Structures are given as structure tokens and as C-alpha cells.
Image (tube, grey):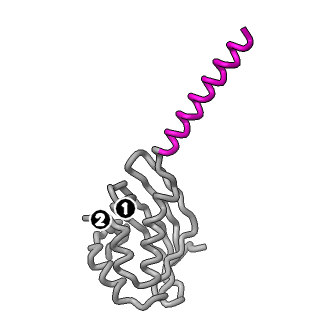
Amino acid sequence: MLKFKISNMKSFLTVVFMSFAVFSLAQSTEAEVKAPINQLFEGMKKADSTMVRQALAAGARLETVTKNKAGEITVRSDSFEGFVKSIGKATAGDLDEQLTAVDIKIDGDLATAWTPYKFFYKGAFSHCGVNAFQLIKTASGWKIWSIIDTRRKEGCQ
């Protein structure tokens, strides 16, 4: 009887561990999701517009939460195409966005990343804020679908 129970326990544990391994392989890792974010900022720092473009999904969106002249909160949408072209015109080292943390959440083929940052232009502090990324898993890997950010000069640590 004891032999039967141990055999059943081994079988049960084998099934549990194999199921866990298969489930783990099917799930994307935070490192996979973070890769296009790192690529975006590395491309900015290198002034490599091609590297930046490769991190983006077709039709990607770029938005900023800001205040208008009346002090009302608005969302400004910018062209990623214009952003990518401006990176290509920069000099390597001019654009340095430093993430102070990264919090990633993944559900299947959708991920979100919350990334507080400090931005330096030509070595001088410019502003800080938070990027909120939405990423999608494509046939060629994770891509940035949209970024909405905040920008401020006060309260930066």
C-alpha cells in the first residue's frame, strides 16, 4: 500500500511540475516586455532612429498629459513619426532618459509598464515624470503600442 501511494505521489508531482513548466514557458517574462522599452531609450541616447522605430508597433501613439494656457489638464497627441525623425537629427548622447523604476504587468499579449524617469538634454537636467507604456506581443515580439507621459521640473528626486 505504501509503495502505491509513493508511486501515485511521484506521478502527481511530475504532472504538477510539468504543468508549471509548460505554463511558465507560455508566459512572457518581464525582461521580454522591457526589451523594446530599453531599445527605445538606447536608440534615443544613440540618436538611432532606426533602433527606435523597431521598438514600435505600426500605428503607435505618443501622448503627453499637460496643462493648457488656462491651466486646464489636457492630453496632447504627438506624431511618433515626428518624434523618430527628431531623434535621427540629434547627436549621440544628447537625449538621455533615465528610468528610476519599472513596474510591468502582463496579461497574455498585452502588457503595461509604469516607468518614472529623469530626462537630461546634452547632460543637463531637463525634466522628470512618468511614462505609461502599453505594449502588445506581435509575431516579431513585444512592441510599444502607446506611451502617455507626464513632464514636470518640480518634485524630481
Residue 66 vs residue 77, the one in the foreground? 77
Is disc 1 surrounded by few (<14), some (14 to 19) or many (20+) residues within 10 Å?
Answer: many
Q: Nearer the viewer, mark 2 or mark 1?
A: 1
Callouts 2 and 1 close, C-beta under 8 Å: yes
Q: Which residue is mark 1?
A: 143
Q: Is residue 72 left or right of residue 17?
A: left
Give the dominant element type of the magenta stretch: helix, strand or loop.
helix
Q: Amino acid at mark 1?
A: Lys
Asked whether residue 133 is drawn in magenta, I would say no
Q: Residue at x 50, y 39 (%)?
A: 22
In 3D space, how far apart are the residues under numbered discs 2 and 1 (Cα atoms)?
9 Å
How many labels sit on residues? 2
Tell me which numbered mark, 2 or 1, is placed earlier along the sequence: 2
For the magenta stretch, what is the residue range?
1-25
> Residue 90 lies in what quarter of the image?
bottom left
Q: Residue at x 36, y 83 (%)?
A: 87
Q: Quadrant of the N terminus?
A: top right
Residue 60: which disc?
2
Q: Quadrant of the C terminus?
A: bottom right
Q: Residue at x 68, y 13 (%)?
A: 4
Q: Is residue 11 left or right of residue 137?
A: right
Is disc 2 surrounded by few (<14), some (14 to 19) or many (20+) residues within 10 Å?
Answer: some
